[in-house]
């Protein structure tokens, strides 16, 4: 290996190590959010939304770190929100983030296609500051709609 290649490898290793150390352990990761959203969807489809939402509220395992599940019906009405129950019952179809993006419409379309990631801005439940967020959303059947879990970036 040439000296230049060793130098580049050393720089790459240092960058990767720095990023790993810099990661905030109080913040969820993409992998954790996807696993939690998938588990939440399975739980909703197994026990029904009413029981699942009670379980989400009662058991902290559904709200690790700064993550929480949320659920919209197929019409964009918030069925459950793990960080702010005042949002439940409100229609989010026309809600836009601070950049003007109608992210809930994108979430509904993404979930209908089987699931995926949607980027938007949202207030962090602890800091109350608007931050970049990405949520993994997936389809639910009982009722028809979606469940998602996001991470702040």
Image (cartoon, helix red, strand yellow):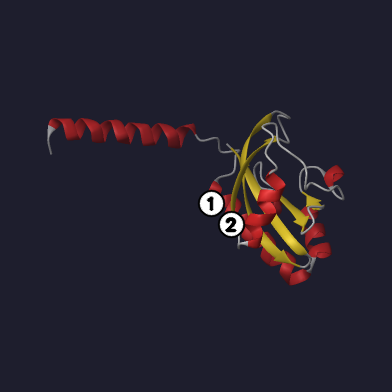
Q: How many marks?
A: 2
Identify which residue, 139 or 86, lies in the foreground: 139
Q: Is residue 59 visible?
A: no
Q: Residues within 10 Å of mark 1 (few under 14, many from 20)?
A: few
Find out whether the residues at labels 2 and 1 contact each other: C-beta distance under 8 Å. Answer: yes
> Which image quadrant: the C terminus?
top right
- The spot of residue 79 in percent (x, y) is 82, 54
Q: Please, is residue 39 above or below residue 78 in the view?
A: below
Rendered residue at 55%/45% (across/down) = 29
Give the position of the N terminus as an image quadrant.
top left
**Mark 2 secondary-structure assignment:** helix
Measuring from the top left, give residue 101's x and y in whole percent.
67, 39
Which quadrant would residue 27 be assigned to in this image? top right
Among the 4 quarters of the image, the one containing residue 134: top right
Query: Can you say whether 141 is above or below 21 in the image?
Result: below
Residue 92 locus on image (x, y percent): 79, 46
Residue at position x 67%, y 51% in the image: 107
What residue is rendered at 69% in x and 55% in y?
108
> Residue 73, image x and y in percent?
78, 58
Residue beneath disc 2: 35
Residue 54 numbered tag = none
Residue 110 showing in the rendered view: yes
Q: Nearer the viewer, residue 73 or 80?
A: 73
Q: Secondary structure at mark 1?
A: helix
Tell me, for residue 31, which label it has, or none.
Answer: 1
Q: Look at 82% across and 58% down and name the residue there.
A: 54
């Amino acid at each position: 290996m040439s000296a230049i290649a060793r130098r580049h490898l050393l720089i790459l290793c240092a960058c990767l190590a720095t990023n790993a150390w810099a990661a905030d352990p109080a913040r969820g990761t993409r992998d954790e959010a996807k696993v939690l959203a998938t588990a939440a969807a399975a739980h909703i489809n197994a026990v029904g939304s009413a029981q699942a939402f009670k379980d989400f509220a009662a058991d902290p395992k559904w709200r690790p770190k700064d993550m929480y599940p949320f659920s919209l019906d197929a019409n964009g009405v918030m069925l459950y929100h793990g960080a702010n129950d005042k949002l439940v019952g409100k229609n989010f179809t026309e809600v836009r983030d601070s950049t003007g993006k109608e992210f809930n419409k994108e979430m509904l379309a993404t979930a209908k296609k089987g699931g995926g990631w949607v980027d938007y801005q949202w207030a962090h439940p602890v800091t109350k500051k608007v931050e970049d967020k990405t949520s993994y959303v997936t389809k639910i059947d009982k009722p028809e709609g979606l469940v998602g879990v996001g991470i702040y970036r």
